Image: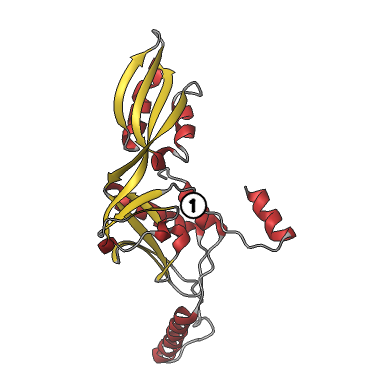
Amino acid sequence: MEIIQERLERENDVDVVQTAPTVSYEYKTTDGKVKRIDSPSELPDRSQLEEIREPMVKLEIITGVDSIGGIMRLAEVRRCKLVKTDYLSPTRVMIEYIAPLAEIVYDFYDQLKGISHGYATMDYEFLGFEDADLVKIDIMVNKNIVDALSLIVHRSNAEHRGRRLLIKLRRAIPRHQFEIPLQVAIGGKIIARESIKPFRKDVTAKLYGGDITRKMKVLKRQKEGKKRLKSIGMVQIPQEAFMSILDTGDD
């Protein structure tokens, strides 16, 4: 993926921003219309929505009996609903779930392989769209919403997912000459915040002795200069910041 992006930029002069894979959602407006969207940025204001529907799948996992506990814990975290468990042999079992496609589309298979030491297999079949308590979380960098970082998540996971994402963005976005606030908002309400501290230059290093007011004046000028930078400065967001939302694991 990185090689393809580099070739597009170098050979075709095309600026590419890679973002996390997403799924299609359906929403029903208050006037009864049903529409489908492919990006969280297309979701209208919550006041116009009657319900949001997410794609659901029938998920079948075949694994060894020694991995059942770990796989069930993984499925529970991903909001999968257990349907049945069939023992195919004394050492193998098939577990069937009803699962949200958004919860398994990216790294579910990798984690499944890790838990089962590579022996588990999975298959899923699309069932349809189902109403769920979903919300769109907006990521604000320096008080500006970045549409490419918006996500549609279940309300129960919104705050935790948002805080975890801000920590990853704080590490991925380089420091600037001014402080950069990172915020998570749901419908205009801020639910989490992190800050990227500015570079600090010792502007009083060349001042020797004298009245303390000399240093205070210099520090005041520096503070005013950073305030001007903050009002007109553009935050450079690297590709790593957009890709950080792919990593759903805790660290």
Numbered disc 1: secondary structure: helix
| Mark 1 surroundings within 10 Å by alpha-carbon count, few (fewer than 14), some (14 through 19), many (20 or more) | some
Q: Residue sitting at 42 percent across and 48 percent down?
A: 24
Q: Toward the viewer: 106 or 218? A: 106
Question: Quadrant of the rendered structure where residue 195 is?
Answer: bottom left
Q: Residue sitting at 66 percent across and 62 percent down?
A: 14
Disc 1 residue type?
A: Ser
Q: Residue sitting at 34 percent across and 23 percent down?
A: 69
Q: Residue sitting at 47 percent across and 71 percent down?
A: 198
Question: Quadrant of the rendered structure where residue 162 is?
Answer: bottom left
Q: Residue furthest front?
A: 32
Name the spot of residue 158 as percent of width and height, x first: 31, 52
Horizontal placement of 133 versus 114: left or right? left
Q: Which residue is mark 1?
A: 244
Note whether 206 is above or below 106 in the view shown: below
Q: Residue furthest top?
A: 90
Q: Toward the viewer: 204 or 157? A: 157
Note whether 182 is above or below 108 in the view shown: below
Name the spot of residue 140 as percent of width and height, x first: 40, 66
Note whether 69 is above or below 41 in the view shown: above
Horizontal placement of 7 versus 175: left or right? right
